[in-house]
Amino acid sequence: MQISVSGKGVDVGESLRNHIETQINEHVQKYIDRVTSVHVVVSREAHLFRVVITGNMGTHSGLGFSGRGESADAKSAFEEALEKASKQLRRYKRKITNHHKGDAENPLRGVKAKKYVLSPEVGEQDDDKQAGLVIAEKPTDILTMTVSEAVMKMDLQDLPALLFFNSAHGGLNVVYRRVDGNISWVDPGQKAA
């Protein structure tokens, strides 16, 4: 993770810079390990120090976090900004963490399935020839989650697509990343009338 500390009209001393870098490393990596960069700007306006923290989570969708603090001294302003940024990271981690594995009331919570990896020639052969070989087979879970949770999970695990049960109605849905970088969501929904 790259951490940059700069001052806007303020000289950031070595002691404060080291404190900021140590605290950022400690707090950010406690919640998420995919943060690529964090920028901290210390400035002074009138009698208050202002610290702004911005970070990039390294996901395809460009998710980030930020925190802002103001105080009479720079260290207190940084602590306030760090607490706000940490709160965002905690919420983000809570969203992507599945706390309901094995939930007895919801049987769709973790439906067991098998995942197969097929050779690329599948579908390119004639009908009279044998289908492609199965290269790998392993068990997997199809989880129940919201669409936003599915997109976050897909981004954090760097998956091209994700099959999940939609928590709104229990039906199977798919989210996938398009060639143009946008995300598509397939929801068969109700049966056609």
Image: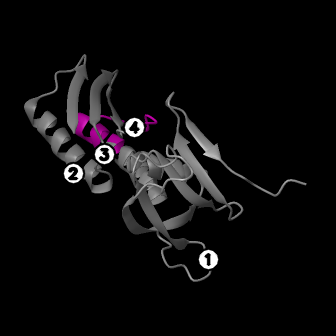
Dot 3: element: loop
Tell which circle, 1 or 2, labels the residue nearer the N-terminal end. 2
Q: Nearer the viewer, mark 4 or mark 1?
A: 1
- The image quadrant where one finds the N terminus is top left
Q: Residue at x 25, y 16 (%)?
A: 9
Residue 7: x, y in percent? 23, 22
Q: Residue at x 29, y 44 (%)?
A: 79
The residues bearing labels 1 and 3 have C-alpha atoms spaced at a distance of 31 Å
Q: Residues within 10 Å of mark 2 (few under 14, many from 20)?
A: few
Tell which circle, 3 or 4, labels the residue nearer the N-terminal end. 3
In this view, the residue farthest toward the bottom is 104
The residues bearing labels 4 and 2 have C-alpha atoms spaced at a distance of 16 Å
The residues bearing labels 4 and 1 have C-alpha atoms spaced at a distance of 35 Å
Q: Residues within 10 Å of mark 3 (few under 14, many from 20)?
A: some
Q: Which residue is mark 2?
A: 26
Image-quadrant location for residue 63: top left
Q: Which residue is mark 3?
A: 34
Tell which circle, 3 or 2, labels the residue nearer the N-terminal end. 2
Residue 176: x, y in percent? 53, 44
Residue 151: x, y in percent? 51, 47
Q: Which residue is mark 4?
A: 66
The answer to whether residue 70 is visible is no
Q: Which residue is mark 1?
A: 106
Residue type, mark 1 in image: Asn
Tell which circle, 4 or 2, labels the residue nearer the N-terminal end. 2
What span is colored magenta in the figure?
Answer: 60-81
